Structure formats: structure tokens, C-alpha cells
Amino acid sequence: MNRYLVTGGAGFLGSHLCERLLNDGNAVLCLDDFSTGNENNVSHLKSNPNFDLECHDLTTPFFPEKINGIFNFASPASPVDYQHNPIKTLKMGTLAIYNVLGMAKRLNIPILHASTSEVYGDPEVHPQSEDYWGNVNPIGPRACYDEGKRVAESLLIAYQEHAGVDIRIARIFNTYGPHMDPQDGRVVSNFICQALKNKPVTIYGDGLQTRSFCYVDDLIDGIVRLMNSTYQSPLNLGNPSEYSILDLANMVISLTNSESELIHKDLPIDDPKRRNPDISLANKIIDWSPSTSLEEGLKKTIPWFDKLI
Ligand SMILES: NC(=O)c1ccc[n+]([C@@H]2O[C@H](COP(=O)([O-])OP(=O)(O)OC[C@H]3O[C@@H](n4cnc5c(N)ncnc54)[C@H](O)[C@@H]3O)[C@@H](O)[C@H]2O)c1
């Protein structure tokens, strides 16, 4: 039986990953400082004898033993969370990465890192393929996250090329599903919570900017496939179906039978106008493509928020 370290395992994606790894017959050490995640996301796993949970801040060293692989998901991920403490966010893109790469090197085990489509910034190329270098403002309000994730990728490549560490880099595009934090200001959770409360649904800008939304189970399947592969370069994981923010708002309002109206607010600085993954490489390398439509995924997600609010 393999035992995996999942950093950020009490967060939205990490908790689904812990569950999937356990269901596949592995053991899991879930490490989290609960800064943006929630212990409740993994409370249903605690009775499993193959599941361990440890509270630790990953910007300080950690020396686990008996680990066969690392999934590095710890990092604030929503703009509200990562802009709350930009210095700490940059430490997660640097110090924390040295720490996990040090672990992988010492134990001679593979490490999969959760990177992001934000490395493409406000892209000038559509859809974004892995060979696009991106368009990122290095001193803007999103830089602590975007540039942190970019330097993290550079560190992974350096450890792979110069220290022989077995790396995987998942460039994750917008993902949604149960276990999202209703307070963290991401568009899907915002819209669902506002619609369920019949409050105005807030559109930033004219709402014509587009995003692609991947249901969490599809994403986690891609993550597991990538770890099981031998592919050592960045790989896009996301759903290529592109929706405008207005389309998303209208779909959420309809699926929640809401009486909410749409209101418009100013677009945040450096907000990307389009985001759409080219997943042809993931298709070829790990035989992966998402199978859940936005409507299907929202129908699975809405009840989670309905219980919470
Ligand atoms: N959800 C998405 O759409 C998305 C898209 C692209 C990339 N990602 C990446 O995936 C990863 C997980 O994102 P998420 O959406 O699950 O966010 P999340 O905030 O729900 O989860 C992140 C987890 O990391 C933990 N964490 C933060 N700082 C820590 C520290 N110093 N030490 C230990 N734990 C710490 C948090 O408490 C939380 O449980 C992040 O690295 C994020 O950048 C997510």
C-alpha cells in the first residue's frame, strides 16, 4: 500500500483528493494549517485507519517518514484569500516549495504540484497551451499568487534537472464543486450563495469575460492520472467548454429557481478577460478529458451550499 502526503488536504481540492486516494486503497497523511481550508472537509475520513491528519504550516520545514509520494496543494487559492496576506502567499510559492522539494529529494519520491492557469495571467493567446509563456503583471495585486506559482514551477524544474527529483506539474484551471468555501469570493460559490438567498447576483464588469469551469471529480481524476504517468513538464487540466460570466449567472439562477437580479460592479484590476485551456496534451499524455457538463456539475454542487447557508 502506498502512503501519500497531501498538503492542503483539508482544502477544497485537497479533501477530494484525500478521499479519492483512500478509495483507491492508499494511505494518506493530510497536512494543513487550516488557514483557508476547513477540518470539516475531512471529518468523514477520520475514522479510516489509513488516514492521518496533521496541523502544520508548510512555510516551515516538515520531516515526514514512510511516504511514497507528495501531492502539494497547500496555498491560498482565491483572490480574497491570497490578497489577504501577499507576503505569506509568496512564501507559499517559494519557501514552502523548497520544503516539499527537499522532502521529495530526501525520500526519493515523486511530487505533484498544484500549479494554476494564473501562470498565463491575462492571456493574449486562446486557448492557452502549455508552451504559452503568459502575460503577468509582476507588481499588480494578483502578482503574489501568479508570480509565486510561476517561480514554484521554476523551482520544480530546477530540482528535476539538477537534483533528479521526479516531478509533475498540474496547471489547474477554474474548478468547482462541494467543499468550496462560501466566503472565499470565487465566482461559482458567490453566484450560488447569492442565488440561494435570492440576493442580487454580482457581475464584475459587463459579464462577457469568459471562464472554463471544471467539476472537481473530473479534475481529481486528471491529477491521479498525471501522478501515475511519467510526464515531467507542466500539463493543463481544465474543462475547455467556455462560458461567459453572464451565462454562468443565468444558469445558476435558473437551477436554483432563484428570484435574484443581476447587478454590475467594476472589474477588479488585472482580471483576465478570457481563460480557456487547451487540453490536447492531457488528452494525449494521460488520456484525460472532463466528462461532467457545467449544468450537471452545478446540480451536484448547489445542494452542498444549500446545506451550509
Ligand atoms: N480550485 C481551483 O479552481 C484551483 C485552480 C488552480 C489552482 N489551484 C490550486 O490548487 C490548490 C488547492 O486549491 P483549493 O481551491 O483547494 O484552495 P483551498 O484554499 O480550499 O485549499 C488550500 C489549502 O491549503 C492550506 N494551506 C494554506 N496555506 C498553508 C500553509 N502555510 N501550510 C499548510 N497548509 C496551508 C489551506 O488551509 C487549505 O486547506 C492550491 O495550490 C491552488 O493554488 C486551485
Image (cartoon, helix red, strand yellow):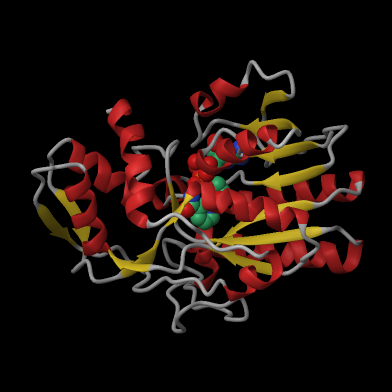
Residue 98 image point, x, y percent: 76, 52
Residue 57 appears in which quarter of the rendering? top right
Residue 203 image point, x, y percent: 20, 58
Can residue 209 be seen in the rendering of this structure? yes
Residue at the (64%, 15%) spot, across then down: 47
Give the quadrant of the N terminus: top right
Q: Is residue 298 above or below residue 168?
A: above
Q: Is residue 63 left or right of residue 57?
A: right
Which quadrant of the figure shows ligand 1? Answer: top right
Q: Is residue 110 left or right of residue 201?
A: right
Residue 100 image point, x, y percent: 76, 47
Residue at the (28%, 46%) spot, across then down: 190
Residue 274 appears in which quarter of the rendering? bottom left
Q: Is residue 56 left or right of residue 167?
A: left
Give the quadrant of the C terminus: top left
Residue at the (18%, 56%) spot, across then down: 250
Mark count: 0
245 or 298: nearer the eye? 298
Residue at the (22%, 66%) spot, across then down: 207
Residue 138 image point, x, y percent: 51, 70
Can residue 87 be seen in the rendering of this structure? no
Residue 31 appears in which quarter of the rendering? top right
- Furthest toward the top, the residue is 47
